[in-house]
Image (cartoon, rainbow, N blue to C red):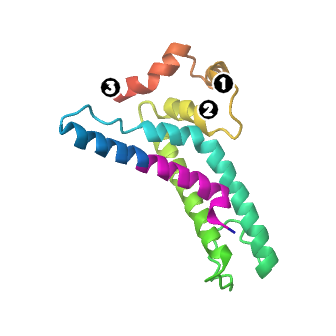
Amino acid sequence: MKSDSVPAFALEKEALKTEIEAGIQTGVEQMASGQKDKKPVEKYHNTRHLLRQYRKVAYAVEISETDMNVRMEMEHGIRLSTLKVNAELAGVDLSGSKIESYARTVIRSKNMLQIIENALDAVRKDPDHGELMYQILYLTYFTKKRLPNRDAILIELDRLGFPMSMVTYHIRPSSFRQC
């Protein structure tokens, strides 16, 4: 099995490819212009892309984990339901097998998702605007099922005690950075 056929690996590979291409393009532009004081590179564009892809990545990781567990059960008679259990501790030698790299990819992807979820939890702890920012981010990017449109997000925010207009919804994150 080629590693590209693993959904989580393919998404991670595409994100890395995009980041490398952006870095190369920036380097080429700086060399061509010969100027160091060029317009600053937007540092957060990849974060927004990652947030927009979060549901797809989480779904792909879930599918990959399920697939890996089926393979583990078929080949070794053991199921690693949470992937927190090390295969060696379970008495399974995966070295050199196709499942070894597959398992590493799934574990790495799950760890990446955990880092993102930890960052979201850290936002919630902000003493000034944490709960509001958490709810905006959660409803916009992290719910299991994507809300159909911004109006649905605003209705849900209102239900949670954070009423706001569409304009406020769009300018709110930038206004917090200035506080």
Label disc, if present, on residue 148 of the rendered structure: none
For the residue pair 32 and 157, the one nearer the viewer reads as 32
- Comes first in the chain, label 1 or label 2: 2
Q: Residues within 10 Å of mark 2 (few under 14, many from 20)?
A: many
Type of amino acid at the residue the image marks with label 1:
Glu
Instruction: Confirm or deny contact between disc 1 and disc 2 (CB under 8 A).
Output: yes
Q: Residue at x 18, y 35 (%)?
A: 37
- Dot 1 corresponds to which residue? 156
Task: Give the percent coordinates (x, y) of residue 51.
Answer: 54, 40
x, y percent for residue 117: 55, 48
Task: Give me the residue at 70% from left, 60% from top.
Answer: 64
Say whether marks 1 and 3 touch (CB < 8 Å): no
Residue 1 appears in the figure: yes
SS of the residue at dot 2?
A: helix
Residue 116 coordinates in the image, percent (x, y): 52, 49
Residue 46 found in image quarter = top left
**Quadrant of the snapshot with the C terminus:** top left
Left or right: residue 79 compared with residue 158: right
The Cα atoms of the two marked residues, 1 and 2, are separated by: 8 Å
Main SS class of the magenta portion in the image:
helix
| Left or right: 34 in relation to 149 | left
- From the viewer's perspective, is 125 left or right of 32? right
Q: Which residue is mark 2?
A: 139
Q: Look at label 2 and name its amino acid.
A: Leu
Residue 92: where, in percent of width, then height?
Answer: 68, 84
Measure the C-alpha gap from mark 3 to mark 2: 23 Å
Q: Which residues are magenta?
A: 2-20
**Could you say which disc has been placed on residue 178 in the image?**
3
Residue 103: quarter of image? bottom right
| 134 and 18: which is toward the camera | 18
